[in-house]
């Protein structure tokens, strides 16, 4: 089964990736994004820089992973509704806010108070993320509508229900999805911020994120009693959307998008932190495509 989505950071997508990778192997995962921008990610590098674009087949993979994924990638899908399934993970805005806040201040080591971080993310961070990632498949000139967006997904489940939901969607993942993930070193000895347990502040978070909360509630209302099936899913709508996507976005344009907006932009940011050994390794890899790191300064 090919499972496809582009998950919002801190909603549990890493758990899905971990289970898929352990069962099917890394060569069946197409990684797209900041954390996947490594020399080991040969498939993505070849996709962005290679000349044989016609040889790339998204159907060769069981899962697409990475926050920089975009629905235009489905232009490369040889669509088979019996093998291709879409999913959406949702998380309530307050829980998501705190998880993202800790990632920002601990993992990214940036300074922010909960109050300043709330304003930094804005009232519709989640909604805007999905607009950016899925507007293309919903129609090049169409306005993003939540009710149409929800028609695209076979499955919708909450972060807190990932273990139960994914085990039913793909029983082969049942044992692995239950395994505990590694604890990041920056979270060892972690002490939550006092405001996380302040009801008054959390109400402010929910009020400020009213747009995201309305989006969350609308998504949640589409979930059946089994906690993962989507009552809004429309098979014909998805099929037509993919067909129209292929008409609107050529494979060359899609490859150019990922090469310029994801690969080159990402590598340009990473370049500044590379030591000489890392630069040598990258130059050796890029030499296969008649390029070097000087192209990314």
Image (tube, rainbow, N blue to C red):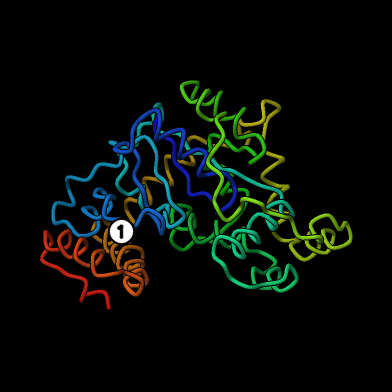
Q: Is residue 135 left or right of residue 24?
A: right
Residue shown at 31% from the left, 56% from the top:
38
Q: Considering the image in quadrants, where does the N terminus appear?
A: top left
- Examine the rendered structure and indicate whether residue 38 appears above or below residue 83: below
How many other residues sit within 10 Å of disc 1, few (<14), some (14-19) or many (≥20)?
A: some
Find residue 28 and report its image quarter: top left
Image coordinates for residue 65, horizontal then vertical, percent: 42, 46
Image coordinates for residue 249, horizontal then vertical, percent: 32, 57
Instruction: Say which residue label 1 marks.
Output: 254
Secondary-structure class at tag 1: helix
Q: Along the line of sight, which residue is nearer the eye, 141 or 292?
A: 292
Instruction: State the residue lying farthest toward the right.
Output: 200
Residue shown at 52% from the left, 42% from the top:
152
Q: Along the line of sight, which residue is nearer the eye, 45 or 72?
A: 45
Q: Is residue 216 left or right of residue 233?
A: right
Q: Considering the image in quadrants, where does the C terminus appear?
A: bottom left
Instruction: State the residue lying farthest toward the top.
Output: 171
Image coordinates for residue 72, horizontal then vertical, percent: 38, 54
Image coordinates for residue 201, horizontal then vertical, percent: 84, 63
Instruction: State the residue lying farthest toward the front.
Output: 189
Q: Along the line of sight, which residue is nearer the eye, 52 or 149?
A: 52
Q: Is residue 284 left or right of residue 142?
A: left
Residue shown at 66% from the left, 45% from the top:
219
């Amino acid at each position: 089964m090919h499972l496809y989505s582009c998950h919002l950071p801190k909603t549990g997508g890493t758990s899905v990736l971990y289970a898929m990778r352990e069962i099917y192997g890394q060569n069946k995962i197409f990684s797209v994004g900041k954390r996947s921008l490594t020399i080991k990610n040969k498939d993505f590098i070849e996709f962005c820089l290679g000349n044989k674009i016609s040889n790339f087949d998204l159907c060769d993979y069981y899962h697409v992973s990475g926050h920089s994924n975009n629905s235009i990638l489905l232009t490369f899908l040889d669509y088979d509704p019996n093998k291709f399934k879409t999913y959406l993970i949702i998380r309530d805005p307050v829980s998501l806010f705190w998880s993202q806040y800790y990632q920002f201040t601990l993992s990214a080591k940036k300074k922010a108070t909960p109050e300043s971080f709330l304003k930094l993310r804005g009232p519709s961070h989640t909604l805007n993320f999905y607009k950016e990632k899925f507007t293309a498949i919903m129609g090049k000139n169409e306005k993003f509508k939540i009710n149409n967006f929800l028609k695209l997904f076979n499955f919708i489940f909450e972060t807190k229900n990932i273990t139960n939901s994914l085990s039913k969607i793909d029983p082969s993942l049942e044992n692995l999805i239950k395994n505990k993930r590694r604890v990041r070193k920056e979270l060892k000895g972690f002490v939550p911020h006092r405001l996380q347990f302040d009801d008054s502040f959390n109400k402010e978070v929910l009020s400020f994120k009213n747009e995201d909360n309305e989006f969350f509630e609308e998504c949640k209302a589409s979930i059946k009693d089994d906690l993962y099936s989507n009552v809004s899913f429309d098979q014909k709508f998805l099929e037509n959307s993919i067909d129209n996507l292929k008409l609107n976005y050529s494979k060359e344009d899609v490859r150019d998008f990922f090469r310029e907006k994801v690969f080159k932009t990402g590598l340009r940011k990473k370049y500044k932190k590379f030591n000489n050994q890392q630069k040598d390794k990258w130059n050796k890899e890029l030499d296969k495509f008649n390029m070097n790191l000087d192209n990314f300064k």
